[in-house]
Image (cartoon, rainbow, N blue to C red):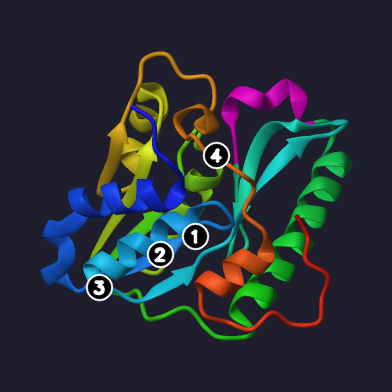
Amino acid sequence: MRFTDRHDAGRQLAERLAPLRDSKPVVLALPRGGVPVAVEVAKALNAPLEVFVARKLGAPGRPELGIGAIAEGGVVVLDERAGPWRGDDDQLRATTAAEQAELERRVDRYRGGRPLPSLAGATVVLVDDGLATGGTARAALAALSEHRPGRLILAVPVAPPATVQRLAAEADEIVALHTPAVFRAVGQWYRHFDQTSDAEVLELLGRTPDAHRDTR
């Protein structure tokens, strides 16, 4: 089964998450691609929506190869399977610093200084448009756990079974609509999977773009 686009995926995901409505959840989106999905989830659950930023750490000289991820709050999670690709300590620090700067830029751009809603004791639903290796989701879940939510749920339209299994201990529940055994990329499960821009994120959040350049 394929989704038409991220909004379609969000509406389908919201149907699965409907029993959470009475728990008054807080919905957090991993930007950028998770925002259109999360908008539909938050609307259906009558829940507040905010972004929570995490960034992949790419291997030195091979940025497409993930060696871990960082998330808000200074949380760094390294992939134990990527040891040979991490480079030396100076390279790892440089990579982390660059991604931390981009993370802070996105937090400032998307939230404009607004703090996260109170998450302590709350049912928190973290939403993305899909998982591949799950590195950024893992970092985000680790960071959100520090806020002591009452229940932490990761919800995605599609993810490979191995990734769901690997993340099972990081959340109270993982909701994945489809877990195909043959999985090449998240985008293959969408008919339309254009990159989500900063401007679209701000529009979906109901916020006015600032004067900064829109980075795609």
Crowding at mark 3 (Cα within 10 Å: few <14, some 14-19, many 20+) = few
Is residue 128 in view from this perspective? no
Q: Mark 4 or mark 3: name the one nearer the start of the chain.
A: 3
Crowding at mark 2 (Cα within 10 Å: few <14, some 14-19, many 20+) = many
Which numbered disc covers residue 39? 2
Q: Which residue is mark 1?
A: 35
Q: Mark 1 or mark 3: name the one nearer the start of the chain.
A: 1
Residue extent of the magenta highlight = 78-86
Q: Residue at x 51, y 74 (%)?
A: 205
Q: Is residue 144 magenta?
A: no
Give, as a three-letter code, the residue at label 1.
Val
Crowding at mark 1 (Cα within 10 Å: few <14, some 14-19, many 20+) = many
SS for callout 2:
helix
Q: CA distance from mark 1 to mark 3?
A: 23 Å
Q: CA distance from mark 1 to mark 4?
A: 18 Å
Is residue 72 in view from this perspective? yes
Q: Mark 2 or mark 3: name the one nearer the start of the chain.
A: 2
Q: Which residue is mark 4?
A: 135
Which numbered disc covers residue 121? 3
- What main secondary structure does the magenta stretch of the protein show? helix
Q: CA distance from mark 2 to mark 4?
A: 22 Å
Q: Residue at x 58, y 66 (%)?
A: 201
Q: CA distance from mark 1 to mark 2?
A: 6 Å
Q: Position of residue 132 (x, y in %)?
A: 51, 31
SS for callout 4:
helix
- Between 209 and 160, the residue placed more toward the observer is 209
> Circles 1 and 2: CB distance less than 8 Å?
yes
- Closer to the camera: disc 1 or disc 4? 1
> Circles 4 and 3: CB distance less than 8 Å?
no
